[in-house]
């Protein structure tokens, strides 16, 4: 069976995501299986996921995916490069994916591949250093450096899905992967932060206590509506702002120095304002300079609160954690068990058999879930140890 992998967050899923899955099948064949490597209870933008990971995974399967596995936390709370590297490595480790499918504003891989090769060239490193001396952010410096080599073609680095697509291509090359890249065109309104059909628009509606369900496939909406009725969502970080600040204020200088992206004194700025400012937003606002993107600071802040260190994201994935699946997905899972060299986790208790690094990674995930559930709307749902009790959702 042909199998395609998609790296995603579905925070939450919407009709644009469903079209991506459907168009992937159109390109490969309607009988192909689709496996999603999805972020867990936290999101790459540096925030709490709006619904718990098993529920989001189930909504993905209900809307067309066949199997959803978890992208571990250290790769989620990472830059686009780290997020892509973790996702590609995880899909490659399955041993069954012949394709990787992603959305992009470009809608084709040729221009993205040219940029991927440019960014990986020895010339780029020197040019980026030159641009950084002007005081611009790293992302802006990289785009300007690329434009000195490729001209207007470097404008693709200005849009979020293109950026991730380029990083997927770089990760595929670095892994010497045989997975064939496919990209599906995404309009300006389709990416996170765009118009009504975007995950950010849905989160905004939920934040305003409005119903976003019409913008989702009905089968997925039913699952997330149930989570809402049970008081397990929607989830927002400001619910546990005091807990986040308390955690940060107890950390020492060494803990901040070991954070991902802790360079050029940024760790010291974050530590200083974490211990003095009265809110998460004020910590971020005071730490922010024009050189650093707010998303980078949000990720650093969450990494500090959750105990994620720089070295965690450079370890390769240590296991494959199944979150949800259907009949086709379970059939593919049997093939994965035969071909993958990584242990497969279908029940939390199976983590006790993991080796040292793998068990440490799973424990970080469990600890993060204990923190996440504190933000559930209903206090009675906030009990600890939930990572050890929830099994995959079979649709």
Image (spheres, rainbow, N blue to C red):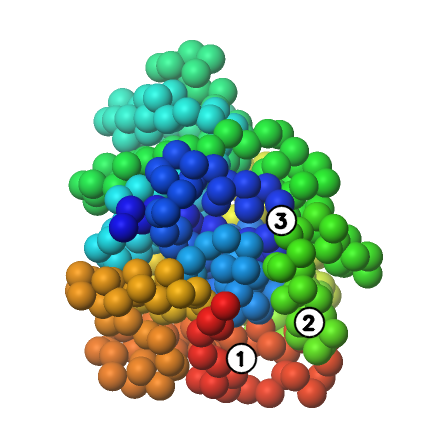
Point out residue 110 in the picture as x, y percentages from the top left corner.
35, 21
Measure how far apart labels 1 and 2 are at the Cα level.
Answer: 21 Å
Point out residue 45 in the picture as x, y percentages from the top left corner.
55, 51
Residue depicted at 37% across the width and 80% down the height: 347
Residue depicted at 24% across the width and 27% down the height: 122
- Between tags 1 and 3, which lies in front? 3
Residue depicted at 66% across the width and 51% down the height: 216
| Quadrant hosting residue 342 | bottom left
Q: Which mark is residue 147?
A: none
Say left or right for 134 vs 128: right
Point out residue 57 in the picture as x, y percentages from the top left corner.
51, 63
Residue placed farthest to the top in the image? 151
SS at mark 1 in the image: helix
Point out residue 136 in the picture as x, y percentages from the top left corner.
52, 30
Measure how far apart labels 1 and 3 are at the Cα level.
Answer: 27 Å
Residue contact at pointers 1 and 3, CB within 8 angstroms: no
Q: Which mark is residue 14?
A: 3
Measure how far apart labels 2 and 3 are at the Cα level.
Answer: 17 Å
Q: Is residue 177 above or below residue 156?
A: below
Callout 2 crowding tier (Cα within 10 Å): few <14, some 14–19, many ≥20: few
Nearer to the camera, 90 or 54: 54
Residue depicted at 62% across the width and 30% down the height: 188
SS at mark 2 in the image: helix
In the picture of the structure, the residue carrying the numbered disc 2 is 226
Q: Is residue 19 visible?
A: yes
In the picture of the structure, the residue carrying the numbered disc 1 is 370
| Quadrant hosting residue 273 | bottom right
């Amino acid at each position: 069976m042909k199998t395609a992998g998609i790296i995603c967050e579905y925070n939450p899923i919407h009709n644009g995501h469903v079209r991506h899955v459907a168009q992937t099948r159109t390109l490969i064949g309607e009988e192909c299986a689709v496996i999603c490597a999805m972020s867990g209870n936290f999101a790459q933008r540096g925030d709490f996921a709006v619904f718990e990971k098993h529920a989001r995974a189930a909504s993905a399967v209900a809307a067309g995916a066949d199997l959803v596995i978890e992208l571990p936390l250290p790769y989620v709370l990472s830059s686009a490069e780290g997020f892509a590297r973790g996702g590609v490595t995880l899909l490659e480790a399955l041993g069954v994916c012949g394709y990787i499918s992603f959305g992009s504003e470009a809608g084709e891989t040729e221009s993205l591949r040219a940029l991927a090769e440019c960014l990986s060239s020895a010339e780029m490193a020197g040019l980026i250093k030159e641009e950084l001396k002007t005081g611009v952010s790293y992302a802006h410096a990289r785009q300007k450096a690329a434009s000195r080599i490729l001209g207007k073609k470097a404008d693709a680095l200005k849009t979020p899905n293109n950026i991730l697509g380029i990083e997927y291509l770089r990760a595929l090359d670095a892994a010497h992967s045989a997975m064939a890249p496919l990209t599906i065109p995404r309009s300006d309104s389709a990416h996170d932060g765009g118009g009504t059909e975007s995950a950010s628009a849905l989160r905004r509606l939920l934040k305003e206590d409005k119903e976003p369900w019409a913008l989702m496939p009905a089968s997925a909406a039913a699952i997330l509506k149930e989570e809402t009725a049970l008081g397990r969502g929607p989830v927002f970080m400001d619910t546990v702002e005091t807990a986040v600040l308390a955690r940060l204020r107890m950390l020492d200088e060494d803990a901040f120095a070991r954070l991902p992206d802790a360079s050029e004194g940024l760790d010291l700025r974050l530590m200083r304002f974490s211990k003095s400012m009265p809110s998460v937003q004020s910590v971020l606002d005071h730490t922010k300079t024009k050189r650093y993107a707010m998303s980078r600071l949000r990720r650093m802040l969450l990494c500090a609160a959750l105990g994620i260190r720089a070295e965690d994201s450079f370890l390769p994935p240590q296991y494959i954690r199944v979150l949800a699946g259907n009949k086709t997905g379970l059939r593919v899972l049997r093939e994965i068990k035969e071909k993958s060299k990584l242990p497969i986790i279908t029940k939390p208790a199976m983590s006790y058999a993991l080796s040292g690094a793998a068990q440490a990674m799973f424990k970080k995930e469990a600890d993060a879930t204990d923190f996440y559930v504190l933000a559930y709307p209903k206090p009675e749902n906030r009990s600890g140890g939930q990572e050890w009790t929830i099994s995959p959702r079979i649709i």
